[in-house]
Amino acid sequence: MTFFAVLLIIGLFTILPLIGVYIASELWNLDTSGMFVANLIHVFIIFFSALLAIKKVKIKNYGWKENGRTFLNTDKLFSLILRYSIILSIIVFFLYGRAIFSGVYRGDVRTSVGAFGWLVTFISRYAVPGMMSFATVVYCFYSDKNTQEKLRFKFYILLGLGVIVGLMLGGKSSVVTMMFPALIQYSQKLTVKKGFYIGLLGALSIVLIGEKQMGQTFSESVSYNIYRSTDLAGFGTACVWDKYPNGCPSAYLTIFNTFGENLASKITGINRHSKEFLQFNVARDVTYDYYMDPEGAITGSGNLTVTSFGEAVYWFGHNYFFILSIIAGILTYKLIVILYRTRRSDKLRYNTLVTIYFTSVYVSWLNSTSGSLLSTFLGLTTFFYMILLYFLLKYIEQSSKKKIYVKNSIERKGARCSY
């Protein structure tokens, strides 16, 4: 079960939209002929690349070593992680959670946060998941039974804070995605039974949260979430397939998102919240043309999701989409190999960064793209968040180093040296 979490996460964000295409393509009143087969090829290339990476990981025997040793004071480490997680959770509550718990629509909350939107993104997608990932490794692989008993309460509190931050984001799947980094780290210890229970708990939490948020019955929430993860998840991509059979001639404009939408708006001189700016973001573009919320597309309060396959079509059309699929496969292979190759006691911080990059950048791109792989993986905002996380982890790690005192066995009090 070592690779259960990685394959499961990739599957959730590639196979479910594919199922939506298969089931609902006849209901969309769009030209989707050939789309399912093309999407299937895209998904196959990504999974084939993932399996190749896993094969290499097995041959090289990469992975965390049981009962490994570190020079970290685990008690102090957990105290620091818990302290900063609490502080960051409080910040998210006042910026975001308070409005979400009051029943305000998530899209309206997102647009109202304004200049602090980056902080909510950093905390919820990088900082808190990153600290949970780091703590999970130390707890599961670098702590003996006595230490685990001592740290168990703090570890559970930390996981609970992750759940709370996920709830404050307002998305039904946010709680589950918050746990992805910790799950990836823990999967090396997973059994089939535990994996089944974790998967069931994750699905149940999404249904129950949706039930409370939308005032639905349990069965209504189940039906809606199946629709949301399949039909609706594939609809945005189907719109791209219908609108750009030969690819979009101005797809290169999405590269401006490398600087972030605010800076891209200043560079181009086009108002971010205008119809003209929609060409810089494929999701907002098709939302305006195909969805019943053109105002939401302009303000950014509501968007259709366009998958990585949709981006491939947006750039290269029906006939040559596989070019980007192959690039996606190479990225998948490289990231998975690095993810497991860095599972070493002297690479804890680096491995955490790679894990967060995998879940918050790569996986996010699989499910929801703005139209440019380049701007997603090499964007200034991505680097900014990763650098912030690096320094946060570095501070926590260095503040938790064990102090080692070495006595000088040669030097004695009153000893004399003669030459």
Image (cartoon, rainbow, N blue to C red):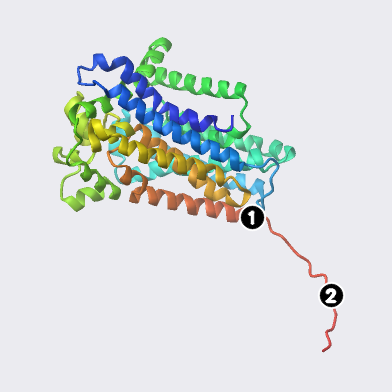
Residue drawn where x is 43% and y is 53% of the image: 387
Mark 2 residue element:
loop
Residue drawn where x is 28% and y is 50% of the image: 259
Quarter holding the C terminus? bottom right
Q: Quadrant of residue 105?
A: top left
Residue drawn where x is 37% and y is 39% of the image: 328
The residue labelled by disc 2 is 412
Q: Is residue 375 above or below residue 188?
A: below
Q: Residue furthest left?
A: 276
Specify whether 123 is left or right of 324: right
Location of residue 364 in the rendering, given as x and y in whole percent from the top left corner: 38, 36
Disc 2 marks a residue whose amino acid type is Arg
Q: Let me know if residue 87 appears in the view.
A: no
Location of residue 159 in the rendering, given as x and y in whole percent from the top left corner: 55, 34
Q: Let me know if residue 308 appears in the view.
A: yes
The residue labelled by disc 1 is 401
Residue drawn where x is 21% and y is 30% of the image: 286
Front one among 359 and 409:
359
Q: Residues within 10 Å of mark 2 (few under 14, many from 20)?
A: few
Q: Which mark is residue 126?
A: none
Disc 1 marks a residue whose amino acid type is Lys
Distance from the alpha carbon under mark 2 to that under mark 1: 29 Å
Q: Is residue 388 above or below residue 50?
A: below
